Amino acid sequence: MRIYLISPTHYAADGSLHKTTRYWTSATTLPYLKAITPLEHEVSFVDELFYDVDLGHPCDVVGITAMGPQIARAYDLAAEFRRRGRKVVLGGTWVTLTAEESLRHCDAVVAGEAETVWADVLHDLAAGRSRGIYRAAGWSSLAGMATFDYTSLPLFKQDAFRSSALYRMYFHWPVIFSRGCPHPCEYCAVQTYYQRSYRTRPVDDVMADLRAIQRHGGNRILFLDDNPIAHPEKAKELFRAMIPLKVKWASQSTINIARDPELLDLAARSGCVSLSIGLESINEESLAGVRKDFNQAPRFTEDIAKLRRRGIQVIALIMVGLDGDTPDTFGRTLRFLIDSKISFLKLFTPCPYPGTKYHEDMLKAGRILDGNWARYDYGSPLIRPTGMTADEMIDGFRYVYEGFYSVRNIVRRFTPPPPGQLMESLAYVVANLKVNRYLRSHERAWATIS
Ligand code: B12
Ligand code: SF4
């Protein structure tokens, strides 16, 4: 069969498709799915963030992945392809957590990991049948994961990589070390999808990927993991092995990385230059309300200082409007972010992803304000907060963003920059100035910065 795999974009507030021509990394979902597809099938793929979906594609099966607000576009594409007589399969995090609802939009749903069920789905569709929801019986081993040609990544621009030193600094090659997360944060789709399980790949397999990337001339890595340090001893083993490679890497991580001196030392020595950390809130009560109390907000200032001392730029992920937050939380949050010299900020309003405990609680309490999945982005008022009105939440959200990215505060945050990483700091200053300009020219940019 001919299979067409799609990663959709999301709709902008005016109903147009959000598009861009450049992106700093790429998901691996589509090339990886291609790599695990039985060889008798022919597979092509497209990421709609850059390219247009070919609605007339001469395929037998369309496979669509989706994250967050992309789900609205995924359902529309599914409807259009089915109208044109194609079989449609949906998969990915969102679909997994809403499998029954998703099945109404397609011929088959892959709920959870595809490794052990994808061949069955294709076999059934080829025979003109479908079992509806295909769910793997257990978690598949991460040893010997299928590999793919890294230059086929949907958002990688090979020409730009060859011709532009700036692009070579900008593009981060995606690598996976682990899947899942054992923490209980109630709003989190990751721990819900993986049922709080956690697995790492053998270090040798990850090293093979890193070497393959280096053979292509790549030296900047992004770990796609949600929590690569959940098993600290495994992470230490990986970081130790990576030291001789002399790559630079970025990742998400919990703040626990700052609280284990050996782990932090190995991370820094293996080339860690920036970490996106889900601090979420400076309010202990707000953290406890979503079971993220392991964060221990009073330790943040000291933790961030430790990371900066090792030359690591800290990207803070913060939620505003959680229970426990009041209008004065915004000012305190902004001051904290500036005083701790955070390099980059991603703000979120609380988002009740269907399937999570947080969604269930908000639904029961009648606090969900918007059921339009297309608006399940970073900064829409989706739940009614308890300590302020929804309007106050959005005003506060803008106030923190505007304050954080004001030129005056950019200067304050990078004076002095983290030691030993001058080029990284310069790149972050430029990125900050770009956000400053973007925020001023795009009215609803607040909700879609990534
Ligand atoms: C890379 C990434 C991005 C990139 C994507 C760039 C691009 N277009 O290439 C960027 C940074 C832009 C991004 C943005 C966002 N992302 Co994102 N992203 C990821 C990340 C880190 C990796 C995805 C990946 O490559 N995984 C590796 C592949 C191999 O695994 P996989 O995708 O899970 O696929 C497996 C199965 O799920 C299944 N599968 C998946 N899709 C399909 C489809 C079919 C047809 C089949 C058969 C199987 C199948 O098969 C695979 C093998 O088992 C994941 C977290 C993660 N660790 O997965 C979050 C994640 C998917 N993102 C998420 C979200 C919410 C977002 C955002 C809304 C912002 C945010 N809050 O993080 C935006 C939305 C984008 C938009 N358009 O508006 C959530 C999804 C939650 C949900 N319920 O939907 C995740 C899980 C992160 C999280 N912490 O919650 N993201
Ligand atoms: S630590 Fe991060 S990935 Fe893990 S459950 Fe909490 S929010 Fe999710």
Image (spheres, rainbow, N blue to C red):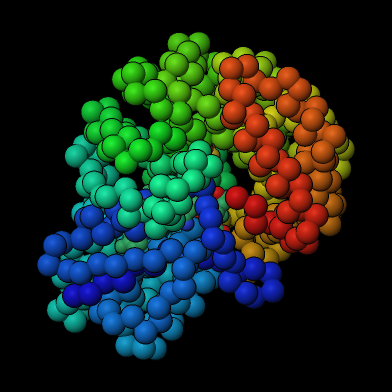
Residue at position x 43%, y 63% from top? 47
Can you give x and y, in whole percent of width and height, for residue 148 in the image?
Answer: 25, 50
Residue at position x 37%, y 76% from top? 106
Quadrant of the rendered image containing residue 83: bottom left
Can you give x and y, in whole percent of width and height, for residue 67 in the image?
Answer: 49, 58
Considering depth in this image, is 331 or 268 the residue closer to the camera? Answer: 268
161 lies above or below 417: below
Can you give x and y, in whole percent of width and height, for residue 137 in the image?
Answer: 24, 52
Considering depth in this image, is 124 or 386 the residue closer to the camera? Answer: 124
Residue 235 visible, this angle: yes
Residue at position x 57%, y 61% from top? 20
Can you give x and y, in whole percent of width and height, for residue 157 in the image?
Answer: 43, 54
Residue at position x 64%, y 64% from top? 375
Q: Which residue appears farthest toward the top when viewing the image?
A: 261
Quadrant of the rendered image containing residue 339: top right
83 lies above or below 341: below
